[in-house]
Amino acid sequence: MSEPPVPDDKLKDVLGDVKPSDRRSSPRYATRGTVEFHRPLETDRHTGRLVDISEGGLSFVTKVPLPVGETLHLTYEEEGRPRSTQATVETVHATQKEAGYVVGAKFVR
């Protein structure tokens, strides 16, 4: 079952004071787009809003709680880009906010 994405007018409320980690090996770039993900061996697909991206990972906002260390199969599409990209990620942090969760994930494959 897919949840509706966090609306644009709530995105700032969700992100709030979440700050990027100082441990990043490459800079992240703010972007907009969509994320669709599922857990391995599960068919339920979930959605989110892409927030930023780097060579090593990405951040997105979703209404789905995700534990740190969880592996996800993810497809994301940046606004203005002609195609989707598939990746396997591992959650690094998931911060609950009033309107959803801010998830940081690193690329693992």
Image (cartoon, helix red, strand yellow):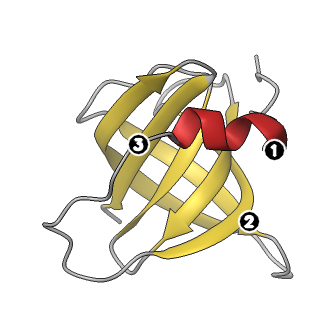
Name the residue: 33% across, 73% down.
56
Label 1: few (<14), some or many (≥20) within 10 Å? few
> Which-is-in-front pick, marks 3 and 2?
3
Residue 84 horizontal side relative to residue 62, left or right? right
Question: Would you say the residues marked 3 and 2 are in contact, meaning their CB atoms lie under 8 Å apart?
Answer: no
> Which-is-in-front pick, marks 1 and 2?
1
Q: What residue would you read off at disc 2?
A: 77
Name the residue: 38% across, 44% down.
18
**Mark closest to the chain's N terminus, 1 or 2:** 1
Disc on res. 17: 3
What type is the residue that disc 1 sits on? Asp
Q: Nearer the viewer, residue 24 or 15?
A: 15
Name the residue: 37% across, 52% down.
105
Which of the image's four quarters has the C terminus?
Answer: bottom left
**Mark closest to the chain's N terminus, 1 or 3:** 1
> Which-is-in-front pick, marks 1 and 3?
3
What type is the residue that disc 3 sits on? Asp
Where is 50 relative to 68, above or below?
below
**Is disc 2 placed on a helix, strand or loop?**
strand
**Is disc 1 placed on a helix, strand or loop?**
helix
